[in-house]
Structure formats: structure tokens, C-alpha cells
Image (cartoon, grey):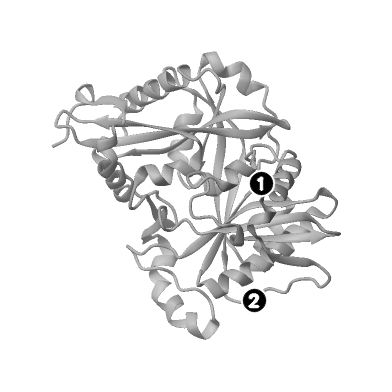
Amino acid sequence: MVFPTRDIRFEPARPEDEPELRRVMRETAMDGTIRLAFAREPNFYAAAAVEGPAHQAIVARDPEGRVVGLCSRSTRTLWVDRTPTQVGYLSALRLEEAYRGRRQMLQRGFDAVRALAQADPATTLHMTTIFEDNAPAIRFLGANLEGFPRYRRIGTVRTLALPTWRRQRVPAGLALRPGVDADLPQLAALLHSELRRHPLAPVWTEADLRDPALCRGLRPSDFTVAERDGRLVGCVALWDQTAYKQSIVMGYEGGLGTFRGLVNLAAPLLNVPRLPAPGEAVPHATLSHLAAEDDDELPLSLALIATASNRAIGAGYSWLTLGVGDGDPLGDEVKRQYGAIEVRAALFLVSWPEGHAAADAVTARVPRLEIATL
């Protein structure tokens, strides 16, 4: 049964809502050339923990107690203008189809999120991403209508899907190897010193890297590290999150859907990954924790990615995902070398009147969001 908006309650999620949160995530796909549902099996809260040390969910509940929508707010420390800053990330905005297009529903949901933000004065900035394929949402929220938070676009996040269909050439003369536990102090120091140059990149500490919730499923051996003169100068991790976060193909639009069968028929002959059938999860890992010393950041980053890609082939991953900001030369090089598929998302700072001044002071330029934590 579909209820009037006035009968819907917006409130913090309860522990017993967990199965309902997973259901809403599983059943609400994001439109685009490839329609994807971002599932959180087998536990919504376990998946949410990687987004940050603090996580909250708001649910829209009908009079029968059923969850018909949700929104998440997580907070973590990011680099903002080279300064460690507590930032909130708004995500997982989902509504069942019967409740979409109701302006008052969205308004009341944002009011509930604002209350969470006001109760957390240490977090003065909030951000969110919207896929560029979702043009209606960008137009509506970007219009900054009365009663809604202000959305200020500060950049574009490019998610590149790299096929692992052939081994990559790694330049000679580089000392590249898998990470070990003893590397973690140096890894934390490297990430701290190099990521501060990249707006909105995470601030990682050794404790974070060892945290079984923040870095769920990530082992020291999943890192590829570059050494020079006995010290670490670069790193990247191959982070498999499919045990708690899944990207499920719900369908294809246009020619991709029409010719998927032909593409898959030719895939073994061409040694390229097959396109999953609707209902299947994409077998992939994320390239995360990428950092390289400034003097040769681009070539060293490419060598690290190539080495990680070669390791991924042996581990059975068909795809790797990498997040870069629009304007970062790394993105163009990776797309050219790997023939990567690109998904673009608009990056916004979200603020209410009490937070406009803090948002206006941010000069993000080319962001480096860690998509593994979104």
C-alpha cells in the first residue's frame, strides 16, 4: 500500500531495521547505461563502517513500519586545503519507486539529515556525489530551491573500470613488491605526506590501516609498494570488498543491452571480460590507497597500478575500479592504456545556512576521493 507523504515518518534507523535497509539498497537501482544496484549483503552496517568511524542512517517509515526510503551520513577526516578536516558524506539516498518525485518527501528527509548535522558541530562540511547520468537529480538539487540544502558543485569524480584482460608491462628498474605487516608505519607516513596534496583524500593513520572495520577485508599483503633506497615511495592496494559491498547489474540500456550476448560470445576469443547478466554481481576489486612521491607521481602511479592489475589477473578479478578527479592526468593515462569504461559523478558540497561560510571557503580544484570508502 502507498501512503500519503504526511503519514511517512523520518527518523534514525534502528538496529532491527538492518534487513530492511539491505532490501531497499538491493531493490533500488541507479539508472544509466548500465543499471546498477549497490547491495550491502550480508549486513548493511558492516558495509557502512568503511565509510568512516561515525555512520548514521535516516529511514522513511510508513505507518505499517515498513522502510520505504533511506539516506546515510558518515564522517571521516579528509584533506581540505592541506588541512585535516572532519567531513560528512551524504550517500545512499534511496526511495521506493512509488514515493519518488514527491518534493515534500525529499524536503523532510533533508530536514532529518540537517538535524544530525546540527548535533555534530565538529563536522562543518558535507559532500555528496550524483552520477552525471542522473541529470534530473542534478538539475533539481542544483537549483537550490527554498527548503532544501544548497548544493555547490566543486568538481567531477571519474570512476574508471579497468578490464584485466591482459598482463601489463611494468617499467624495469623499479623495486615493487607485495606489502607486509611491518610496512604499515611507513605506509601511513607515505599516505599522510603525499595525499595532503590531493583535496578530499582521506587522512590515513597506522591505526586506521589496522582497523578491522575501517579497512574491512584489507590485508597488508593486498598492498603493492614501491621502494627506493630502503624506504617506501609509492603504494596502492587491491581492496576486495565484495564480501560486504556488491555492484549488481540490473539491466543494460541501448546497444549494450542488445549486443551483450555477442560481446560475451566473443569474449573468450578476444580474452576480454564478459558482461554480467542482469542479477549478477560485477567481479571486481578497487584500487585504493594510491600514493606516490611528488617528483615522479604519474609514472610511479602507473607502474603501481600495472603491478596491481597483474596481481588481480591471478586472483580472478575481471575488473578493477579506480577513482580520480576530472583534470587529474592519471585518469586520462589509465583510460588510454586500459581501455577503461568511465562513469562520471558530479561532486557537491552540501550546506545549510549555518554551514555556507565553511563550504564557500573550500577550493577543491582536482579532488582525489577514495571511492572504496564511499
What residue is rendered at 82% in x and 58% in y? 230
Q: Nearer the viewer, residue 111 or 231?
A: 231
Label 1: which residue? 326
Q: Is residue 170 left or right of residue 245?
A: right
x, y percentage for residue 92? 40, 40
Q: Which residue is mark 2?
A: 167
Q: CA distance from mark 1 to mark 2?
A: 27 Å
The spot of residue 104 in percent (x, y) is 31, 23
Q: Most extreme residue toward the bottom, as rendered?
A: 269
Q: Amino acid at mark 1?
A: Asp
- For the N terminus, give its image quadrant: top left
At label 2, which amino acid type do we have? Arg
Number of other residues with Cα within 10 Å of mark 1, as a class: few under 14, some 14 to 19, many 20 or more: many
Q: Residue at x 81, y 48 (%)?
A: 294
Asked if 84 appears above or below 209 in the picture, the reply is above
The residue sitting at the front extreme is 182
Question: Looking at the picture, how far across and down is residue 328, in whole percent?
Answer: 71, 49
